[in-house]
Image: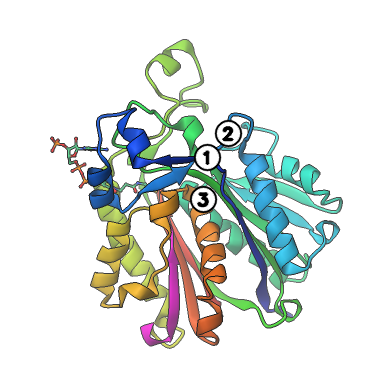
Amino acid sequence: MTIRVGVAGIGSYLPERTVTNHDLEKVVDTSDEWIVQRTGIRERRIASDEQCSSDLATEASRMALEDAGVDAEEIGLVIVATATPDQQFPATALRVIENLGCSNAGGWDLSAACSGFVFAVQAAAQYVRTGSMGAVLVIGVETLSRIMNYEDRTTCILFGDGAGAVVLTPHDRTDGGMEYLAAYMGSAPDRDAIIQPGGGSRIPASHESIDSGAHFLQMDGRRTFKFAVRTFTDLVRRSVADHGGASELGIVVPHQMNQRIIEAAAERLELPIELFFSNVASFGNTSAASIPIAMRDAKEAGRFAAIRGKLACMCAFGSGLSFGYFLLRV
Ligand SMILES: CC(C)(COP(=O)(O)OP(=O)(O)OC[C@H]1O[C@@H](n2cnc3c(N)ncnc32)[C@H](O)[C@@H]1OP(=O)(O)O)[C@@H](O)C(=O)NCCC(=O)NCCS
């Protein structure tokens, strides 16, 4: 027997500290005009010195649990998608479990950078679908500011910190909530396009690795841009192919990378830009956290309530290169 899976609740948390493009003008050779024109980003949030990923994740999860009407003790599994865990081990998920009091849960971290949240939702859905879990908490969180080189203007202007979370349960517990319909994941190996090379088994932390900046996020912007537009377009097409086509789409909530990427994909798909939810201007690229943060904002803006019965496509693409989507019936 398979159980229909639903999204019971959505939460997000953004740190208070806002860093505007004008603030970055004082740190690197850039301008508000350049950043807005090339990316659409105006500001991003940065965690305080006292906050690490589990702190952001805990706040977002509290909101998601409350939204779902699910108690922390009901959660059987916590998955944290992140490229910036509290530390390599133990898993950040365990700290979140402790913070929330999820006394009946196990947990693990999932490392797939910007695609992490979409993959984590896919994994979580299988536990609910098979009946082995009654409620799973899925979190996307990043403190990318901790691996950012604030002397590299090609990367530091793009990224921000934040967290988002959803609670998956059987659909009949969601009070008419969104139903998980389908999903997909893929890869196109390209190791260097976006990478944090240092700190793992290939380049362990050393004085040399630190001196060479191997612990910072490094990226080939143009290569990533082209990949993103192509992949984004393919994912949206593929997601609706077996579900009535693009006319059934009520909203696309993409990984928030760059407004130009969203606009280019909309144009290629010949779909109105209004269909694509974007908050990249306010938060920049928060990697694994961007989709659940955008889902929460879309919910608060009444975007889901306005499209009952339609499809919502959440698609992600990033380091790896990796990509995927999950599709909901709103
Ligand atoms: C990074 C990105 C905004 C750069 O935009 P672009 O139009 O491709 O710009 P280019 O890299 O061609 O650089 C154009 C010029 O601007 C300069 N430049 C780069 N960053 C700059 C900045 N922050 N401020 C001012 N000038 C900058 C470059 O040095 C280059 O100068 P040159 O022509 O004298 O060499 C864009 O490629 C992008 O968004 N890529 C996707 C990256 C991404 O989202 N990655 C995350 C994946 S999850």
Q: Amino acid at mark 1?
A: Arg
Q: Is mark 1 within 8 Å of ligand 1?
A: no
Q: Secondary structure at mark 3?
A: helix
Task: Check the image and report above or below for 330 versus 41.
Answer: below
Query: SS of the residue at dot 2?
Result: loop
Residue 153 appearing in the image: yes
Determine whether label 1 and label 2 are within 8 Å by CB.
Answer: yes
Distance from disc 2 to disc 3, alpha carbons, whole Å, reads 19 Å
**In the image, 61: left or right of 286?**
right
Q: Position of residue 257 (x, y in %)?
A: 37, 53
Q: Which mark is residue 17?
A: 1
The tag earlier along the polypeptide, 3 or 1, is: 1
Front tag of 3 and 1:
1
Q: Nearer the viewer, mark 2 or mark 3?
A: 2
Tell whether position 173 is magenta.
no
Q: Relative to residue 13, is residue 321 drawn left or right? A: left
Label disc, if present, on residue 48 of the rendered structure: 2
Name the secondary structure under disc 1: loop
Residue 51: give x, y in percent of width and height. 63, 35
Give the position of the C terminus as an image quadrant: bottom right
Q: Give the overall secondary structure of the magenta segment.
A: strand
Q: Where is residue 220? Give x, y as percent.
A: 28, 40
The residue nearer to you, when weighing 187 against 224, is: 224
Label 3 sits on what residue type? Ala
Q: Position of residue 20 (x, y in %)?
A: 39, 41
Crowd class of label 3 (few under 14; some 14 to 19; many from 20; radius 10 Å): many
Does the CB distance between marks 3 and 1 fall below 8 Å? Answer: no
Tally the numbered discs: 3
Residue under pointer 3: 288
- Read off the magenta span: 246-255
